[in-house]
């Protein structure tokens, strides 16, 4: 990152998320270029980092948005994503969400069940429109990633089987209020192997061919997200190889390739900064207690995820320590057995690869305000989310009538 961390902390305090917007540009360009002259749309997975400034930056580059709630759709629209580049996915959409998405005329509503298709059809009928839909198929491919973020097996709740998808397409084709133009799959996140992606693409492309044979013309081939990133020493997939694997499976199909990367765009575009409060030793276990916690960055506690942690400008003999936050849970840690020199009050730690699924998974647990967020772009820092105050947190409670308790 091209700015001094100490200066950022002096100006914005901690806990703090900092994103490198130039890196986001590079990630976007790299992926977009990988598809070369092919028709493609990078629909950024808003769930990975939904800050308006992040979405706006990607929208300016030409990205679309993959959304999983009407809130995310609204964020995308507000940030300037073109409506014809917005996709709305998710296993449980409410009627009100479906209606609003249809009224906004976004690119695609992605269906995850037959029951949902009927709801979308009914609402589209009420609105007297034809809803552009895609269907999420579950190709039953093992993505070889963490079970919590694996989604393409039948044991997962996502998508429908190939057989049901085909039945749904035939139904949708006959409906006056459904226009089946897309197909979608997403087998999992943090994928580091190409073979499962290639296999899933092949299976879904075959379905597209068989649909074509019965007059159903699929225009959007959505491969989901999932490209893995380096947190530790993983060997990841190069965008060029990723694109080549997809293209090799869809030969002869005249489709626009949609992809929904989240982590790939954001994980290593962001760091989380936290200050040391105290050191303490229990028996022979060393703890460094910091002002950031599981409510700010949940991934270590939830998935036992590894994030590299380093001290800023700190010399000295290193020994192992657990980096823990102030939250009242034994599971509140940011790192385990991290090699660090002796730390003092107000020393800064950098938690790396924190740009994706960091802030978006944060909470107010223990009445802790959410962290501030800063963008660094061309060497300049800009605040993109204020630090949440106590008043922000209690606003919706303080506004309620309390007279019944007097
Ligand atoms: N598309 C769909 C349909 C998805 O379900 C997801 C992620 C994405 C795209 C974006 O995947 P990505 O490119 O970021 O891998 N909280 C977990 C990750 C959950 C991912 C959920 N779905 C984590 O912190 O690792």
Image: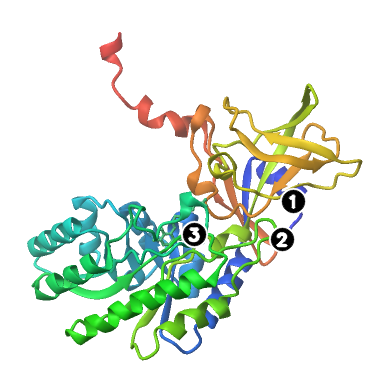
| Quarter where residue 45 is shown | bottom left
Identify which residue, 135 or 393, lies in the foreground: 135
**Residue at image point 34% right, 84% down:** 255
- For label 1, the residue is 5
Task: Decide: few, some or many residues near mark 2? Use Cα within 10 Å; few <14, some 14-19, many ≥20.
Answer: some
Disc 3 C-beta below 8 A from ligand 1: yes
Left or right placement of residue 379 versus residue 255 in this view: right
Marks 1/3: CA–CA distance: 30 Å
339 w.r.t. 92: above or below: above
Spot occupied by residue 385 in the image (x, y as percentages of width and height):
53, 48
Residue labelled with disc 2: 1
Helix, strand or loop at disc 3?
loop
| Vertical position of residue 35 compared to residue 135: above or below | below
Residue 283, compared with residue 13, is above or below; it is above
Above or below, 107 against 122 in this view is: below
Residue 46 percent across, percent down from the top left: 44, 59
In this view of the protein, which residue sits in the foreground, 269 or 186? 186
The reply to whether callout 2 and callout 1 are in contact (CB within 8 Å) is yes
Label placed on residue 189: 3
**Badge 2 element:** loop
Q: Where residue 113 sits: x, y (%)?
A: 23, 58
């Amino acid at each position: 990152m091209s700015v001094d961390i100490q200066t950022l902390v002096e100006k914005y305090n901690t806990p703090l998320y900092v994103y490198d917007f130039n890196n986001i540009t590079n990630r976007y360009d790299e992926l977009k270029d990988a598809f070369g002259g092919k028709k493609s749309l990078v629909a950024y997975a808003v769930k990975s980092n939904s800050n308006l400034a992040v979405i706006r930056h990607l929208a300016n580059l030409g990205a679309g948005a993959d959304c999983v709630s009407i809130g995310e759709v609204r964020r995308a629209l507000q940030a300037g994503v073109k409506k014809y580049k917005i996709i709305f996915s998710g296993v449980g959409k409410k009627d009100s969400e479906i209606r609003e998405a249809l009224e906004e005329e976004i690119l695609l509503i992605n269906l995850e069940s037959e029951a949902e298709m009927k709801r979308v059809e009914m609402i589209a009928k009420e609105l007297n429109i034809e809803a552009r839909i895609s269907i999420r198929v579950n190709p039953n491919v093992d993505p070889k990633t963490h079970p919590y973020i694996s989604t393409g097996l039948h044991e997962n709740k996502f998508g429908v089987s190939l057989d049901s998808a085909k039945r749904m397409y035939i139904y949708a084709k006959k409906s006056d209020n459904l226009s089946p133009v897309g197909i979608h799959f997403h087998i999992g996140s943090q994928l580091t192997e190409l073979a499962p992606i290639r296999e899933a693409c092949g299976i879904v492309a075959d379905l597209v061919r068989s649909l074509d044979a019965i007059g159903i013309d699929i225009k959007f081939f959505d491969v989901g997200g999932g490209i893995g990133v380096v947190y530790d020493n993983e060997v990841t997939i190069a965008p060029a190889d990723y694109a080549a694997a997809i293209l090799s499976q869809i030969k002869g199909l005249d489709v626009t390739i949609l992809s929904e990367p989240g982590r790939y765009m954001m994980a290593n575009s962001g760091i989380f900064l936290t200050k040391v409060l105290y050191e303490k030793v229990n028996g022979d276990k060393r703890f460094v207690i910091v002002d950031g916690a599981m409510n700010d960055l949940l991934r270590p506690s939830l998935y036992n995820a590894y994030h590299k942690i380093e001290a800023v400008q700190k010399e000295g003999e290193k020994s192992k320590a657990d980096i823990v936050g102030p939250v009242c849970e034994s599971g509140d840690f940011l790192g385990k057995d991290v090699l660090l020199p002796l730390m003092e009050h107000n020393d800064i730690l950098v938690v790396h690869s924190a740009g994706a699924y960091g802030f978006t998974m944060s909470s107010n647990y223990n009445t802790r305000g959410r962290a501030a967020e800063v963008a660094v772009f061309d060497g300049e820092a800009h605040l993109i989310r204020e630090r949440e105050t106590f008043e922000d947190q209690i606003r919706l409670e303080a506004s309620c009538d309390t007279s019944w308790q007097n």
